[in-house]
Amino acid sequence: MIDARYRRHDTWRMMQIPAYRTAIAEPSASTGAGLRKRFEEAFEADLSLTATGRTAAWIQGFDVLPPGVAEHEWPLEYAPGLPVEDTAVVDGLPVTHRARTLVDLAAGLPRLEAVAAADQFLRGGIDARSLAAALEKVHGNRLRRANAALLAADPRAESPMESWTRCLIRDAGLPAPTPQLRVRTADGRSAFLDLGWDAWKVGIEHDGMDAHTGTEAELHDRHRHHALHGLGWEVMTLNAADVMEHPRKWLTELRELLLSRGWDPDLSDLHDIGARIEALTQAMHR
């Protein structure tokens, strides 16, 4: 179901382009039951099974399902006879332990979903020794993909949308933004940008997230953006369609905005960024 192949783009030489998100032709046949209930039934029928992958993450309290997919639509992921040292028990159900689950997701999920999953797990807390031990058991392309996702992860992200946006910005070769950037307003209060660059006073906010819905919240956001603008900040607002469907447009606009605010990269870097934006845009639509 997940295309883990990496392809080469003609104009982005020496760079391997991953699948960026899960391609879903149609939802899985569903009984209406959630992942936990369906795995519980499978485990009762075969006590050798251990939940793995997204199913293990779900049971552990992490939502790493593909965007727009409900848990009753997603197929169970499990394996028989896993080593005891790779497993844990959560609410009476055997699952791969947290570090093993993280490594499996980082190595196996498409790029954006792997980074968002790693952000969640790091924010939830992970034992460094267990993570190192889990990484020792993977090799080759799986190890490379796991390391790439973990290196791109940041526990400060507060939503998958922030994770996906930050990942695309960095993969495009643009300067790394700070998640949940704190800005002091004129009245001494703090405003937090989903992503931001303090050096150039550029921020990104995500529209349509739970924390930003409703008339009162929208009014608050407008006042906050007005206050930030008064302090010299420029704030881009992105929605889910921008991030997931039209990355070329906003990444190009972001590049131009950063340049206008004083970012001064080499011309060779700018050429590389243009090629990267084109390559990841094509990868997003495979």
Image: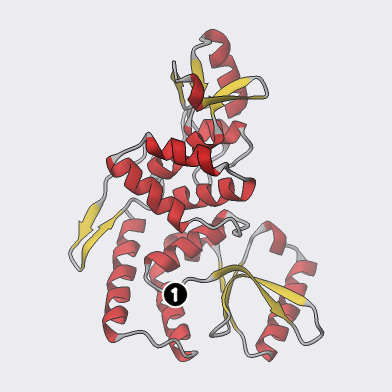
Q: Residue 43 at x, y = what percent?
A: 55, 14
Q: At 21% from the left edge and 57% from the top edge, which residue is drawn?
A: 8
Q: Quadrant of the N terminus?
A: top left
Q: Residue at x 28, y 86 (%)?
A: 267
Colour scheme of this structure image?
Answer: secondary structure
Side of 158 where 220 appears, left or right: right
Q: Is residue 160 above or below residue 178?
A: above
Quick one: 139 or 63, which is closer to the camera?
Answer: 139
Q: Amino acid at mark 1?
A: Pro
Q: Closest to the observer: 2 or 286?
A: 2
Residue 33 position (above or below residue 46): below
Q: Secondary structure at mark 1?
A: loop
Residue 234, image x and y in percent?
58, 84
Residue shown at 39% from the left, 40% from the top: 108
Percent of width and height locating residue 38: 57, 21
Picture quadrant where residue 13 is located: bottom left
Near mark 1 (Cα within 10 A), the count class, few <14, some 14-19 or many ≥20, is some
Q: What residue did someone put label 1 on?
A: 175
Residue 249: x and y, percent? 41, 73
Query: Is residue 18 visible in the rendered structure shown here?
Result: yes
